[in-house]
Amino acid sequence: MSKATRSMIGHYLGVIFIMFWGLAPFYWMVVVALRDQRYTFDTTPWPTHITLQNFRDALATDKGNDFLGAIGNSLIISVTTTALAVAVGVFTAYALARLEFPGKGIVTGIILAASMFPGIALVTPLFQLFGDLNWIGTYQAMIIPNISFALPLTIYTLVSFFRQLPWELEEAARVDGASRGQAFRLVLLPLAAPALFTTAILAFIATWNEFMLARQLSTTATEPVTVAIARFSGPSAFEYPYASIMAAGALVTIPLIIMVLIFQRRIVSGLTAGGVKA
Amino acid sequence: MNTRAGQARSAAWLIAPALIVLAIVIGYPILRAIFLSFQADRSLDPTTGLFVEGGFAGFDHYLYWLSNRCMSPSGNVSTCPPGVLATDFWPAVRITLFFTVVTVLLETILGMIMALIMNGEYKGRGLVRAAVLIPWAIPTAVTAKLWQFIFADRGIVNSLFDTSISWTTDPWAARSAVIIADVWKTAPFMALLILAGLQMIPKDVYEAARVDGANRWQQFIQITMPLVKPALMVAVLFRTLDALRMYDLPVIMISSSSNSPTATISQLVVEDMRQNNFNSASALSTLIFLLIFAVAFIMIRFLGADISGQRGLKKRKVPGMGRRRKAAAEEEKQEVPA
């Protein structure tokens, strides 16, 4: 075997290793979700005893779970947080990427510090404050703390995107008599749309996946999917409901996976542009 | 209208909303936490039988955590007896630092290997990148449940290796399980960040090295490592800060109790808060906050993690505007990277 062939085989082995790493545990979750729960601990690597009962159990509401409700809560919380973060963040990102002004370094520093800020430091004061305001179990009690990480992430990612936009076009529009606002709205916003969209996806996923704050600040009526899954109780009180939890996990994850498959290229560029946190 | 003063004025208007929002959602809570951390707990006044506000407590709550200094209702100071949350502090610090060092190290090595594999030219690159994004996209809560199942007593790991390890109760098995789940989730993310750094290295540098007779390993040490270092350091910095506040995985996979073998400091804050000890919980969260900023400062200052994003930015691409910029990027490639 020639050296080139050997190196090519090595390379493809590496690629297979990465694919296995990324897909195998997720695949196993789907297999178990589809398998009759009496056979949950079977080790056959492909789906056997196929049933949808686990999905029905996951969505059933008679055991104190309300998974569909939790998905609704997650959507409300994530969409609102993302919309607010992008709406506020886009102006700051524009200023940081495009304008020269005194104190720019300080503002950048504040945004960076905020993006590294540990959410755990917010939990105690907010828990006490929201308790006093009777806000525990309201949506704002979760949206407000989520802004604390979604907004810095949005600004950080948008700034790195905006720095790469062809700003000459803005200048050209200004020369043609457009105001700064018009140039931004008519020329730059269409060009910046992909960046805004990518940033929104990242903020949405980060909010959708949040658990620590939600666990302390939600009640059963407002809990998002992450909290619902963590405290899931199954059809039998005596057996740990792995099969229905895997079904619930698959339900939460599959929309995200579809999003990842469609927007894979954009998500990667967004993650690496900002060097964002996981 | 395009003057410096004009720019400064518009900048102020554009930036103000974000700064106000951040002041509300981060600034106010953190100031309140610092204030609470110096407040004494409410106590029962023995003469009137009424609750009185605690007043200033100095560093009592900090000493409670740092040196396990407990105060009895009568005001006697002694070392905290076992079972008091303060006694879980140093074990939690050790576990958190242990998790941080081990996971970040493993993720960096594995991420580097994955990035080197992904960097080549081959069919199905998009597919590989999508596969790598899956662990990142799955919510950590689901990851935790998934790995809890994989590590269940009769789970696939024990079946495949024909072992009967109780992964969720044996201390070191539980710690390994958490580390494996965390590395699974974040090594691919690390790989993507490193890959972005690798793709910025111009190909002709390797060409020249080959001509000079450098082998693969020498190329890796002499060219790849130094040139990928900025991207690597940013990735390591963010991962380290993330690992220091680890909460979801140990709580969902193993136990939310603050004396479990995998309890992290974040867990301890929540546990203390749930017992309505808002003042000492605030002191502890302030300590975590200081720890994280100290680590960030050290890594940025001494290890050269450049997070301002100035360096190397020119060569990155914006989605959806590849072609227009590619020509410009080609020209810029001629420049030697700083």
Image (cartoon, rainbow, N blue to C red):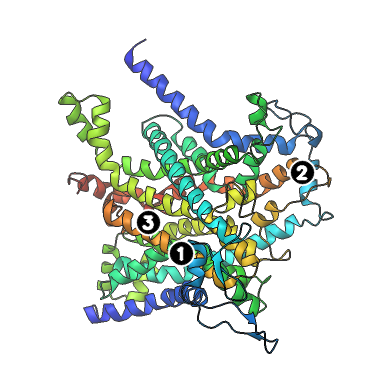
Q: Is residue A77 left or right of residue A105?
A: right
Q: Is residue B212 left or right of residue A105?
A: left
For disc 3, the neighbor class at 10 Å (few under 14, some 14 to 19, many from 20) is some
Any part of residue B94 in sight? yes
Distance of label 2 from label 1 (alpha carbons) = 38 Å
- Give how far across and how far down residue A35 sits, in percent: 76, 34
Which quadrant is home to the N terminus of chain B? bottom left
Marked residue nearer the N-terminal end (3 or 1):
1
In this orientation, which residue lies closer to the viewer: B94 or B134?
A: B94
| Residue behind mark 1 | B287
Kindly check if marks 3 and 1 are in contact, taking CB atoms under 8 A apart as contact: no
| Residue behind mark 2 | A241
Distance of label 3 from label 2 (alpha carbons) = 40 Å
Tell me which chain the residue with mark 3 is part of: B
| Residue behind mark 3 | B295
Co-location on one chain, circles 3 and 1? yes
Which mark is in front, 3 or 1? 1
> Helix, strand, or loop for circle 3?
helix
As drawn, B89 above or below B100: below
For disc 1, the neighbor class at 10 Å (few under 14, some 14 to 19, many from 20) is some
Distance of label 3 from label 1 (alpha carbons) = 12 Å
As drawn, A57 above or below A198: above
> Helix, strand, or loop for circle 1?
helix
Residue drawn at x 37%, y 80% as measured from the top left: B13
Q: Amino acid at mark 1?
A: Leu
Q: Amino acid at mark 2?
A: Pro
Co-location on one chain, circles 2 and 1? no
In this orientation, which residue lies closer to the viewer: B276 or A191?
A: B276
Residue drawn at x 69%, y 70% as measured from the top left: A137
Q: Amino acid at mark 3?
A: Val
